């Protein structure tokens, strides 16, 4: 392989959506920086973080966007969604209301983006098994009915975090190459 080929580069915008406090910001910091913040701080002040991976010996960069807490007021703007080719829709497995709101987030996503967006449903906080309120089966069946990938994750203990992001990134890559 020549240097030219190796330098070929892809940049994908991916958005993270879902109710407040489901763990969106921590999923991103776990994936991009391997960090976890036990104290919820709504605003980190960074719009997105970039993480690269190699696929077919090509550098694929994911520019992953996090809300700055606007979801609390259901005020995520269309600029947030603009140009996104992937989306993680996150709920908290210990709070049923966050699962019930997934449909609203999907509606909003579909309004602001086209149908080819790679989507994954994420049940986060799977380390909190003892206070689980949404079963894995419920998550799976919602994902199946909506044609989404599905995974349970823990930003706290890292379970499936990289796997989830990388699955979305590979799917996007697969659709364009
Ligand atoms: P966001 O509002 O969706 O961005 O949620 P945050 O990332 O700010 O997280 C909200 C709260 O949930 C914080 O106190 C986090 O420490 C906590 N949290 C996030 N992810 C997990 C997880 O996987 N497991 C547990 N036990 N707590 C988590
Ligand atoms: Mg946040």
Image (cartoon, helix red, strand yellow):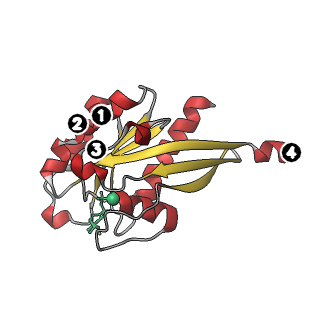
> In this view, which residue lies farthest toward the right?
2
Residue 123: x and y in percent read: 28, 51
What SS does tag 1 mark? helix
In-front residue for pair 71/176: 71
Cα distance between the residues tagged 2 and 1: 6 Å
Q: Is mark 3 within 8 Å of ligand 2?
A: no
What SS does tag 4 mark? loop
> Image quarter for residue 141?
top left
Which comes before the other along the chain, label 1 or label 4? 4
Q: Are marks 1 and 3 in contact (CB under 8 Å)?
A: no
Q: Dot 3: few (<14), some (14–19), or many (≥20) neighbours within 10 Å?
A: few
Q: Residue, x 46% and y 27% (percent of image)?
A: 116
What SS does tag 2 mark? helix
Q: Is mark 4 within 8 Å of ligand 2?
A: no
Residue 124: x and y in percent read: 29, 56
Q: Which mark is residue 2?
A: 4
Which residue is tagged 2?
Answer: 104
Q: Residue, x 60% and y 49% (percent of image)?
A: 61
Q: Are marks 2 and 1 in contact (CB under 8 Å)?
A: yes
> Is label 4 or label 2 in front?
2
> Image quarter for residue 128?
bottom left
Cα distance between the residues tagged 1 and 4: 43 Å
Answer yes or no: is residue 34 visible.
yes
Which residue is tagged 3?
Answer: 75
Q: Dot 1: few (<14), some (14–19), or many (≥20) neighbours within 10 Å?
A: some
């Amino acid at each position: 392989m020549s240097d030219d080929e190796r330098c070929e580069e892809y940049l994908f915008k991916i958005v993270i959506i879902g109710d407040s406090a489901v763990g969106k910001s921590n999923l991103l910091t776990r994936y991009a920086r391997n960090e976890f913040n036990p104290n919820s701080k709504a605003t980190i002040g960074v719009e997105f973080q970039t993480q690269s991976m190699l696929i077919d010996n090509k550098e694929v960069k994911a520019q992953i966007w996090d809300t700055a807490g606007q979801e609390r007021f259901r005020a995520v703007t269309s600029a947030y969604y603009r140009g996104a080719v992937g989306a993680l829709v996150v709920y908290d497995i210990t709070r049923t209301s966050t699962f019930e709101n997934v449909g609203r987030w999907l509606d909003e996503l579909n309004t602001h983006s086209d149908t080819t967006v790679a989507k994954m449903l994420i049940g986060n906080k799977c380390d909190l098994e003892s206070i689980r309120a949404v079963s894995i089966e419920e998550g799976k069946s919602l994902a199946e009915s909506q044609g989404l990938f599905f995974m349970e994750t823990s930003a706290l203990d890292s379970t499936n975090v990289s796997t989830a992001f990388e699955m979305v990134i590979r799917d996007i890559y697969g659709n364009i190459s």
